[in-house]
Amino acid sequence: MTVPNPWSAIILLAAAYRVWLLLAEDDVLVRPRRWIVNLPLEWDEGDPIPERYRLGLAKFISCPACFGFWISLAVFGLWEISPHRVEVISVPFAISAGVVLVAKWAASRD
């Protein structure tokens, strides 16, 4: 087993963050997330929560320390198998994470 050099670690960190953000929060995956946690697509914030709602799973998915750990473990495991390929695949995710963070920072300044 090897440890990534600092630049590789930063790329892997940013890519893992972006993957977590994509799976946990991005609007593009609202439908699959709602299906996984048994929340109807037409549900609104003010509606009562359905009985079959999987609250624990919803909390797990939205938790960067919980779900993020497993995503990070997967990224690191794949990097151990094929470092160059995983870094190449991770770069666009890392750049996207940077864009998201800059956008959040800029929005907080308004």
Image (cartoon, rainbow, N blue to C red):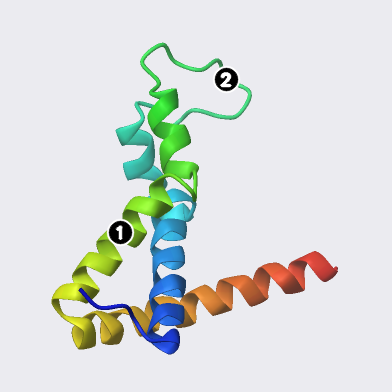
- Determine whether 5 is above or below 49 in the image: below
Farthest-out residue, top: 51
Q: Secondary structure at mark 1?
A: helix
Quadrant in which the N terminus is drawn: bottom left
- Determine whether 89 is above or below 71 in the image: below
Residue 6, located in which quarter of the rendered image? bottom left
Q: Is residue 40 visible?
A: no
Which badge, 2 or 1, is on the more N-terminal residue? Answer: 2
Label 2 – label 1 distance at C-alpha? 36 Å
Looking at this view, is 72 or 23 the one in front?
A: 72
Quadrant in which the C terminus is drawn: bottom right
Residue appearing at x 44%, y 49% in the figure: 24
Residue appearing at x 49%, y 44% in the figure: 63
Residue appearing at x 75%, y 68% in the figure: 107
Q: Secondary structure at mark 2?
A: loop
Label tally: 2
The picture places residue 102, in percent across and down from the top left corner, at 65, 77
- Determine whether 72 is above or below 63 in the image: below
Which class describes the residues within 10 Å of circle 2: few (<14), some (14-19), or many (20+)?
Answer: few
Farthest-out residue, right: 110
Residue appearing at x 56%, y 29% in the figure: 44
According to the image, label 2 marks what residue? 47
Residue 86, located in which quarter of the rendered image? bottom left
Farthest-out residue, left: 81
Q: Which mark is residue 40?
A: none
In the image, is 24 to the left or to the right of 78?
A: right
The picture places residue 15, in percent across and down from the top left corner, at 40, 72
- Amino acid of disc 2: Asp
The picture places residue 104, in percent across and down from the top left corner, at 68, 67
Which class describes the residues within 10 Å of circle 1: few (<14), some (14-19), or many (20+)?
Answer: few
According to the image, label 1 marks what residue? 73
- Amino acid of disc 1: Leu
